[in-house]
Amino acid sequence: MKKGDAICPRCGAGFRRLELSSIKGTGGQFRCPVCDFVLEAFDGSTQVAYRLTIVPSRILD
Ligand SMILES: [Zn+2]
């Protein structure tokens, strides 16, 4: 399992990213739940999960 951190470049929200390379996931996109920015597009070859860890102090309109 790969672990990493990601920051939304638009609103500054922080995420913990987990990738399970032994499990097939579903294709699609992960969008920032705060500002809807597309943080990553998945091809479905691995299972990727994001968890919000840092809520930005300023919520964009
Ligand atoms: Zn964001």
Image: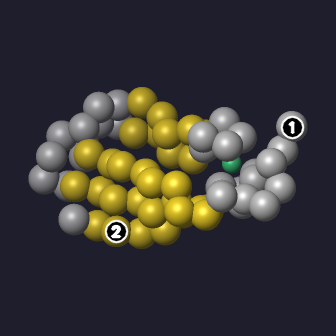
Assess disc 1: are there few (<14), some (14-19) or many (≥20) residues with their C-alpha within 10 Å of its C-alpha: few
Q: Position of residue 44 (x, y in %)?
A: 29, 36
CB at disc 1 and ligand 1 closer than 8 Å? no
Which quadrant does the C terminus fall into? top right
Mark nearer the viewer, 2 or 1: 1
Residue 20: x and y in percent read: 22, 55
Q: Which residue is mark 2?
A: 3
Q: From the viewer's side, name the closer residue of 1 and 13.
A: 13
Residue drawn at 71 percent across, 41 percent down: 35
Question: Viewed as shown, does residue 45 lie left or right of 52?
Answer: left
Q: Residue at x 73, y 59 (%)?
A: 56
**Of helix, strand and loop, which one carries label 1?**
loop
Of the numbered discs 2 and 1, the one sitting upstream in the chain is 2
The picture quadrant where one finds residue 9 is bottom right
Task: Name the image quarter holding residue 2.
Answer: bottom left
Q: Quadrant of residue 28?
A: top left
User: How far from the left and from the top, in percent, is residue 54?
Assistant: 61, 63
Vertical relation: 1 (above or below) 41? below
> Does residue 37 appear in this view?
no
In the depicted view, which residue is nearer to us: 3 or 43?
Answer: 3
**Hey, which residue is sitting farthest right in the picture?**
61
User: Could you tell me residue 14's position as x and y percent?
Assistant: 59, 62
* Residue type at numbered disc 2: Lys
The residue beneath circle 1 is: 61
Q: Name the residue at 26% across, 45% down.
A: 47
Question: Residue lying furthest left in this view?
Answer: 22
Label 2 SS = strand
Q: Amino acid at mark 1?
A: Asp
Q: Is residue 33 visible?
A: yes
Distance from disc 2 to disc 1, alpha carbons, whole Å, reads: 31 Å
